[in-house]
Image (tube, rainbow, N blue to C red):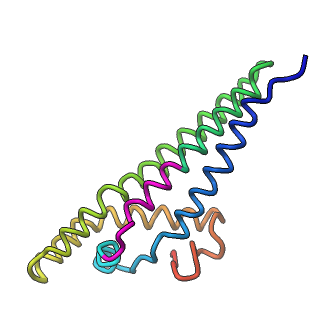
């Protein structure tokens, strides 16, 4: 009897769709400013900033589903202990690394941007920007790490989005 290829098809489909969703979301991501104040102004003017990050989360979950389906398909007929650890490391890294950062960006940044926009004077705006600065620094650090790994060409996410 032939081998059941359903899990391979599910895993492959999730990998392709997940990668496409993430790629489209990253292309839709606006260029960020060099300072927290510039980033907050950009976020306030970009209506779909949170949606772009939620699309990355959905794409990441599809990629995780692909890894789990392919792991299950590859280990269904034989004992592959190392495959379990490799899959667990990838899923854990994806959830803790990109997942946490992107969820923070999707939920917190628009709220900070609204508060910045509604601030009455320069002092209030500076206070909001100062409160946002650690989250902004954390997200920029993640982009620098991607550039260092060679995931984004020449240290740039896109030509207008310098990292470094």
Relative to 154, 141 lies left or right: left
Q: Is residue 161 above or below residue 143?
A: below
Residue 36 sits in quarter: bottom left
Residue found 75% across the figure and 34% down from its top: 8
Residue at far top of view: 1
Give the image quarter of residue 108. Answer: bottom left
Toward the left, the furthest residue is: 120
- Give percent across and percent down for residue 73: 74, 27
Examine the rendered structure and indicate whether residue 111 appears above or below residue 68.
below
Q: Position of residue 104 (x, y in %)?
A: 35, 54
Q: Quadrant of residue 43?
A: bottom left
Image quadrant occupied by the N terminus: top right
Image side of residue 158 versus residue 44, left or right: right
Q: Majority secondary structure of the magenta segment?
A: helix
129 in relation to 145, above or below: below
| Magenta stretch in the rendered image | 45-58
Q: Position of residue 7 (x, y in %)?
A: 72, 30
Horizontally, residue 83 falls left or right of residue 95, namely right
Which residue is at 45% across, 64% downward? Answer: 141
Identify the residue shown where x is 61% and y is 50%: 18
95 and 19: which is toward the camera: 19
Residue 67 colored in magenta in the image: no
Q: Furthest-right residue in view?
A: 1
């Amino acid at each position: 009897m032939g081998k059941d290829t359903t899990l391979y098809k599910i895993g492959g489909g999730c990998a392709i769709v997940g990668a496409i969703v993430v790629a489209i979301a990253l292309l839709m991501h606006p260029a960020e400013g060099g300072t927290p104040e510039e980033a907050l102004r950009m976020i306030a003017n970009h209506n779909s900033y949170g949606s772009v990050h939620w699309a990355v989360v959905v794409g990441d979950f599809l990629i995780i589903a692909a890894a789990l389906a392919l792991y299950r398909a590859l280990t269904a007929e034989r004992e592959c202990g190392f495959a379990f650890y490799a899959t667990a490391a990838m899923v854990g890294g994806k959830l803790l690394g990109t997942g946490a950062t992107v969820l923070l960006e999707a939920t917190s940044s628009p709220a900070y941007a609204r508060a910045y926009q509604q601030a009455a004077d320069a002092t209030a705006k500076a206070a909001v920007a100062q409160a946002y600065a650690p989250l902004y620094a954390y997200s920029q650090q993640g982009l620098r790490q991607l550039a260092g790994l060679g995931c984004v060409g020449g240290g740039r996410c896109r030509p207008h989005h310098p990292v470094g």
